[in-house]
Amino acid sequence: MDHAEKIAFKQRLKRWALDGIGQRIAASREAIDQAQQAANQEEKSSAGDKYETGRAMGHLQKDMHARQLAESMKELAALHSVQTDMLYPAAGPGAFIQAEGIAFFIAAGLGRQQHDGQTILFLSPQAPLAKVLQDKKQGDHFAFLGRNVRILEIF
């Protein structure tokens, strides 16, 4: 890949990550709405405890989804700040790292994903593995899943 192709590839990865987080946000919002509707639709019955339990469960679910939404929003904001329009000589936010048998993109914590026929581990810049990779350069080694892995390329 030449310089322009590497930048275009990283920008596609970032757009893909933005779409993924956007879908998570939409799903969380939908789940919050459904939990609220479920809590509102609990009918008061002669068994008052059942009514209160149903409403409480609905509110607990709503709160759980609200926390997930807040986390996704925070991750989205962090991803927007990641620069993918330049090539990096060392690992850090916005860098793509091709290592022996695995590739990493330090931008958002989406885990192991398939993209363009390649398995890529999307890492949050705050992830422990991203911190291990921080400032590593082509040819450097690091421990991953119990083995010593060499970095083949960073951009």
Image: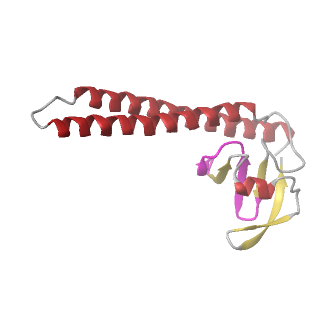
| Residue 127: % across, % down | 69, 52
Quadrant position of residue 39? top left
The residue depicted at 88 percent of the width and 58 percent of the height is: 138
As drawn, 112 above or below 21: below
| Residue 61: % across, % down | 38, 39
- The magenta stretch is 99-117
Looking at the picture, tell me which residue is in the foreground, 127 or 137.
Answer: 127
The residue depicted at 66 percent of the width and 52 percent of the height is: 120
Left or right, 112 with respect to 137, comes to left
The colour scheme of the drawn protein is: secondary structure
Looking at the picture, tell me which residue is in the foreground, 53 or 127.
Answer: 53
Magenta segment includes 113: yes
The residue depicted at 86 percent of the width and 56 percent of the height is: 136
Left or right, 122 with respect to 97, comes to left
| Residue 79: % across, % down | 69, 35
Magenta segment includes 64: no
The residue depicted at 70 percent of the width and 35 percent of the height is: 78
Quadrant position of residue 35? top left
Looking at the picture, tell me which residue is in the foreground, 48 or 33.
Answer: 48
| Residue 5: % across, % down | 79, 39
Looking at the picture, tell me which residue is in the foreground, 104 or 72.
Answer: 72
Left or right, 48 with respect to 54, comes to left
Q: What is the number of callouts on the image?
A: 0
